[in-house]
Image: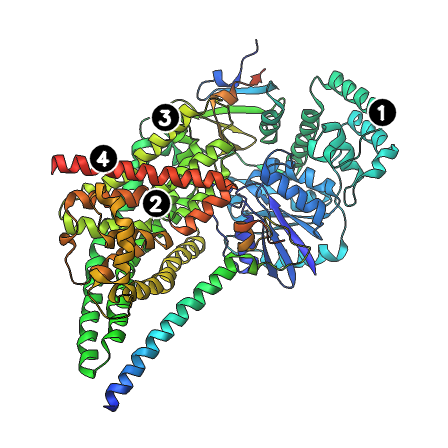
Amino acid sequence: MAKTMDELTVGQRAEVGAIKAPKQLKRRLMDMGFTKGVDVEVVKMAPMGDPMEVALRGYNLCLRKAEARVIELR
Amino acid sequence: MIVMILSNIVVALLIILMLWYAVHTIRKQRKEDGCGSCKKNSAHSCPSSGCKGCSYSNKCH
Amino acid sequence: MQTIALIGNPNCGKTTLFNELTGITAYVGNWPGVTVEKKEGMWNNIKVLDLPGVYSLSPYSPEEKLSRRYILDEQPDLIVDVIDATNLERSLYLTSQLAELGRSVLLVLNMQDLLEREGIVIDTKRLSLMTGCPVVSISASKGIGLESFKKEVEHALKENKAPACPLFSNYVENLLTTIIEDDYLHLIPSGRPQRWAAIKLLEEDELFLSSMPPIPEAFAEFLHQAKTNLRLHFEDDPEAIIIDQRYKVAEHIAKHCQTKKFQKKRFNFDTIATSRFGAIPLFIAIMGAVFYLSIGLVGGYTTGILENFFAYLGSNLSILLDSLGVFPLLSGILIDGIIAGVGSVLTFVPQLFVLFLLLSILEDCGYMARIAFIMDRLMRTIGLSGKSIIPMVIGTGCSVPAIMSSRTIEHQKQRELTVLVTPFIPCGAKMPVFALMLTYFFPGKWYIAPLIYVLGILAVIITGLLARAIDKHKEKNAFILELPRYQLPSAKNVYLQTRERTLGFVAKAGTIILLSSVIIYLLSSYNFTLQSVDSDDSMLAIFGKFISPVFIPLGFGFWQASVALLTGIAAKESIVSTLSVTMGTQALSSFFDPASALSYMTFILLSSPCIAAISAMAKEFGNRKKLLYALIWQTGFAYLTALLIRMLAMLIL
């Protein structure tokens, strides 16, 4: 099992690998820039620990851990 | 006597003017909010030709 | 007539540019997804369209479908691709899709005023060479560069040159060339370029495939083989490969055209605004400050002054008209109808102005997206999304824009639930009733006003929990939201928005409320034989007495209250004006007691909203049955809660 993005802690960086998700969600994530090899950094967790804020391609995005779980890292 | 008649007329006119203005504005708004604001040409399409009316009714075209 | 279409990522400043060009004042806010429908305007004899912000032209989300269908079917003469210059790479991803649509494209680098601060330099000549599109730098919010924008648009319209299509890797390009050569590609509907169609065939784009005749067997076999080869070669599915290729192109262009200086980390408001312990208290504090400033500070000061003013105006005019011998009918309409009714509503203009002003500042600065971020976890426990909080905050001003803004919520059930609960948040128009009741029955008890908001929030939570319990299929849904950069609210946006909302309130006072005040006055002063009678024997009273028994358990089973509720459907402000017209000189306390005043307020807070909000709800539900259920739920829930509140109040008070 590859490591997935929800396992990152604040301040960690990683490179995106494959995305294992249904077609629609996968397209949505890839449209936002999560393509193979892109650098992501976890900026922050929301107060209750769920949505997480990540920085990629020079902008900030928030997504839930459930979505982060489908993004594998390498 | 003349003062009384005049003042009655003035007040009545004032009220009619205000009512007319209110009805006029409401009718104008109705038109804007309804399909009246859409130009019925083929270049437009509901639901989203940009006119206010289409965003409420969906059936202007 | 020529047409240009503005398109770009959410929050890139399209609508600001659109407003700047056309002089139309469309709604602008600093969170992604404000423009949900396309808007049209005129600029120098050119038709300008503002399309919703999109990240991509995928066939999945409604906005993306709309933008894509528009460009393909209605063929604008020029696509104006608005780019947030501080976010070049991701913007170019969209550009790479626009370039394939066969229309000429003009790249507009917006927010160039922010580039220096961010330490970014963009070589526009090179960008133009690499994309094959003319490029122009502007700052829509500051109005910089609009002259050269105009020149470029005219030039591009004259030249009508298609941009360079992004080149993918050789393997993909070879495949595309073979696909284009097949006869099947001649069947594509007009306006669709072949290269684009070939890519859609590879991506298995549902929208495109459904518009095409069935694929002949030999060609289908070939496509299948091609896709299998692609999968083997890139170890991913074709749709993902295309996205990947596009981003590679975007990266390549961005790398060559943009130099970033290393920036020292500056202080970011998010260190507090989304911090672990500070975030939620800060949110509550900000909302508290908004209400304190508008309702408490400004409202407390101005309401009394304006009330006195209208009372003074009314009584003096009455003396004057009497001495002149004006008929009681006419002076009654003017003073007890119009001045009493309209005046009771206009009293609230200053505090609503401040409320609208503060809310539009909140919307414009970028904080809304942060609220969605910090509240998502909480909102999810009641079956809503973090994005549902945005409509609720806007709803404290007016439910109509609030309901419209729920459209940014992707998941349909959550969106509908948000639409259902947004009217529970007391809007500005309900404030006059609360203020009237509170100052009369609970003077000095400042803590009741916040409790009204708490009650509204409780109604949201209860409805949410119930809906979640009923809904058996707990569908998973995505919450993906860009957190935009904070910005100083643009004075122009704030001014326009505040003005529009305040004028809307004033306009209602001058139209619906004026009319209804006159009608209510006449109906409540005459009986069916058109004789002037005491209001208790009037037409309105007889009519109101039909409905009022329903409200006896709630403690306001007299006709004035019922009639006021009915006029409240037209506009909630008219509840106050109707009460003041029908009760005339009688004191409020001869009708209500504190307990029934509370239950009346509760009923108004929670029952179905005004007609404008109802039609906004109808639009979002798109289905009469759902709307009917929603209204029944709101009103039924209001009735039960009001009953409960009255009983509690009778026990305590």
Q: Nearer the viewer, mark 3 or mark 2?
A: 2
At 48% from the left and 64% from the top, the residue drawn is B28
Q: Nearer the viewer, mark 1 or mark 3?
A: 1
Mark earlier in primary sequence (1, 4): 1
- In the displayed structure, does residue C397 sit left or right of residue C32? left
Tell us which disc is closer to us: 1 or 2: 1
Which residue has dot 3 on it? Answer: A47
Tell me what residue is drawn at x 70 percent, y 58 percent: C2
In the displayed structure, C539 sits above or below C554; it is below
Distance between the Cα atoms at labels 1 and 2?
A: 59 Å
Q: Which residue is mark 2?
A: C396
Residue C442 percent coordinates (x, y): 14, 46
Q: Which mark is residue C644?
A: 4
- Element on which disc 3 rests: loop
Left or right: A33 with respect to C230?
left
Q: Chain of mark 2?
A: C
Which color scheme is applied? rainbow
Instruction: For mark 3, name the chain.
Output: A
**Residue C367 in view:** no
Outermost residue, left side: C653
Residue lying at the far bottom in this picture: please name it.
B2
Chain letter for mark 4: C
Q: Are marks 4 and 2 on the same chain?
A: yes
Q: Nearer the viewer, mark 4 or mark 3?
A: 4
- State which mark lies toward you, 1 or 4: 4
Q: Nearer the viewer, mark 4 or mark 2?
A: 4
Q: Looking at the image, is mark 4 or mark 2 earlier in the sequence? A: 2
- Residue C257: x %, y % from top left: 65, 39
Q: Which residue type does callout 4 highlight? A: Leu
